Image (tube, rainbow, N blue to C red):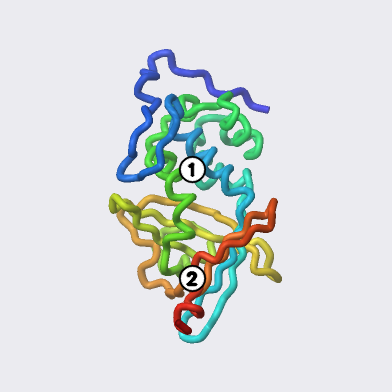
Amino acid sequence: GCAIPQLDVGVNRKKLYRKPCESQGFLLKRGGGMDDLLFSARQFESMFDIEYRFKVARKKKIKEIVLRFSNTQFHHLVGLHKLSDLDYFMKTSKSKIFKEILSTKTTIEHAQVSRHYYEIKNRVHRFGYVITEIFERTEFIYIFDGSKCKGSKIKADFVIKYVSNDGGTSFMFLNRCNSELNDYSCTSFFMYENRDYTFNQEQYKFITIVKVRQSTGETSVLLDRYKMERQ
């Protein structure tokens, strides 16, 4: 495999690590000395045992979505594929990079060696907070038609728009894993900059949200509009 990038001796490491704090309005606090990349990886790892089952509806049309998470998704979601000037991030397997981030063998410092890091900085910072909230605090989901987003190369079936407590807006894209099943995975994640990816897209409303812990089978019903209407 490719070697981990050499660190720039001129990097001010004190600026790379955040003290425990309420970051940009989020209540979740990270441990001391944990950089954004490690925090996001640990947050994403905490989702591996989770399965979400959604029913979404529009004008009596109902669609079902089963969403699961895996370590190979992280690389693209936080934008590490953008670091095209570093062979390590381009040629090493996604699962290996993810494991090396968790073990702190690979750190945010290695990503910051890239001249393209500025392109993903905000994404890396925000992802760890959004991933544990977005699927439980969102009212709408949109069928994504890339032809309605001029210049976009995103390939996805759905997009969710999420506005956090501090007003920051992000977009999570879902892609179907199997054409014969309702299995989906997260394929892309972006912060709002100058484009609303839900604009002019077909809107569906979440009707039911069920959260399943796969290791125990424990099921939590987070939303049931059918039940709410009966009450």
Tell me: residue 125, above or below residue 6.
Answer: below
Residue furthest to the bottom in view is 60
Tell me: residue 167, above or below residue 179.
Answer: above
> What amino acid is at disc 1?
Gly
Viewer-closest of 147 and 181? 181
Report the disc number at residue 143.
2
> What amino acid is at disc 2?
Ile
Question: Gap between marks 2 and 1, in whole Å?
Answer: 23 Å
Q: What element does badge 1 sit on?
A: loop
Q: Is residue 222 left or right of residue 20?
A: right
Q: Residue at x 45, y 53 (%)?
A: 133
Q: Residue at x 46, y 43 (%)?
A: 128
Tell me: residue 229, above or below residue 108.
Answer: below
Q: Residue at x 59, y 66 (%)?
A: 53
**For the C terminus, which image quadrant?**
bottom left
Percent x, y of residue 95: 65, 39
Percent x, y of residue 167: 28, 53
Viewer-closest of 158 and 219? 219
Which label's residue is closer to the chain start, 2 or 1?
Answer: 1
